[in-house]
């Protein structure tokens, strides 16, 4: 482990593999740490240079004193600091959950988007795309997504979510992993810092979910994007993911039979998709089974058509 300084926070960074190989940065979501990627990393490290880090307030990274510093501007500065510490002009980013939300934002952020060779999104549409979908999507599809996103509103309530994470929610998370993904807790996931990390990470929802970037409207992402749909993800609807894909200039759609934590339940499939896409972007042949989604101008709210 090494540490990278970013805006008064020390980020814990973990590297493995050959530094001369293409670099893949695996970015975790909420309420996880870099350890959620362990199984996938074990399958990729012999072919690629891997970088993982604990986001601010999680795992071995420190938390900002000012709770406002969980806003996207600080998250983007963290990502830029980690990429800058790698010593390469560009990296391939793969993000899950909030790691994917960060990836969508990074892919349109000046000074950062040019550092991304590709972006693989798993289990997390961008906030700008979500906002557009909620305003312009079909009524039935929007209601279905709202039903799956109930917890976002709950996280805005003061005190009670913190109390829940101190008591019952860690047990609920373990049951959810078993029910939706067919895997149980293992060393490193959920992390022993889960209750603290989850309480810190509530600020991700409180500082970013309403206003700001949600109201800015989507921008077309020029970075090559692979959007992986986990068919049994209980938090994200296929309609939202289809609408999200249309805001990428060069999107590839892949589908796996998995739940939200696909990198835990189907690590070989996830590692294979990431490796195939990175290899393709680096100059290899397109992966079999990949398909391009329609461009952003085609029915941007509805489900994608196969091509």
Image (cartoon, rainbow, N blue to C red):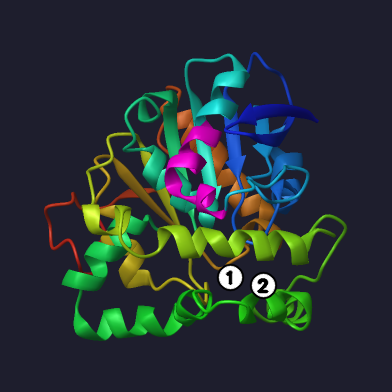
Residue 181 badge: 2
Question: Could you say which is closer to the camera, residue 83 or residue 260?
Answer: 83
Q: Quadrant of residue 149?
A: bottom left
Range of residues picked out in magenta: 67-79
> Measuring 58% from the left and 68% from the top, which residue is drawn there?
258
Q: Secondary structure at mark 1?
A: loop
Asked if residue 18 lies left or right of residue 90, the reply is right
Question: Could you say which is closer to the camera, residue 226 or residue 133?
Answer: 133
Mark 1 lies on residue: 259
**Position in image of residue 299 (x %, y %):** 13, 63
**Position in image of residue 45 (x %, y %):** 72, 32
**Position in image of residue 160 (x %, y %):** 63, 82
> Measuring 88% from the left and 57% from the top, which residue is drawn there?
187
Can residue 50 be seen from the camera position used here? yes
Asked if residue 69 lies left or right of residue 128, the reply is right
In the image, residue 21 sits, relative to residue 55, either above or below, namely above
| Label 2 CA crowd tier, 10 Å (few <14, some 14–19, many 20+) | many
């Amino acid at each position: 482990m090494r540490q990278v300084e970013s805006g008064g926070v020390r980020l814990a960074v973990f590297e493995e593999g050959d530094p001369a190989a293409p670099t893949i940065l695996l970015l975790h979501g909420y309420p996880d740490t870099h350890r959620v990627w362990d199984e996938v990393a074990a399958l990729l490290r012999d072919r690629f240079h891997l970088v993982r880090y604990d986001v601010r307030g999680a795992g071995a990274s420190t938390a900002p004193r000012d709770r406002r510093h969980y806003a996207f501007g600080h998250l983007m500065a963290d990502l830029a600091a980690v990429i800058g510490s790698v010593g390469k002009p560009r990296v391939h980013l793969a993000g899950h959950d909030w790691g994917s939300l960060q990836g969508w934002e990074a892919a349109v952020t000046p000074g950062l988007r040019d550092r991304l060779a590709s972006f693989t999104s798993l289990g997390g549409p961008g906030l700008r795309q979500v906002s557009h979908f909620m305003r312009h999507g079909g009524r039935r599809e929007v209601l279905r997504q709202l039903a799956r996103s109930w917890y976002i509103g709950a996280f805005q309530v003061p005190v009670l979510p913190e109390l829940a994470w101190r008591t019952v929610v860690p047990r609920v998370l373990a049951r959810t992993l078993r029910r939706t993904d067919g895997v149980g807790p293992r060393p490193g996931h959920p992390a022993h810092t889960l209750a603290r990390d989850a309480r810190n990470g509530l600020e991700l929802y409180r500082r970013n979910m309403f206003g700001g970037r949600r109201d800015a409207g989507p921008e077309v992402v020029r970075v090559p994007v692979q959007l992986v749909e986990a068919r049994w993800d209980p938090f994200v609807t296929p309609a939202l993911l289809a609408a999200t894909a249309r805001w990428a200039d060069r999107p590839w759609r892949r589908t796996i039979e998995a739940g939200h934590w696909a990198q835990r339940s189907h690590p070989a499939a996830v590692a294979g998709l990431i490796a195939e896409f990175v290899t393709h972007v680096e100059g290899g042949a397109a992966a079999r089974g990949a398909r391009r989604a329609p461009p952003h101008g085609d029915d941007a709210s509805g489900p994608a058509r196969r091509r």
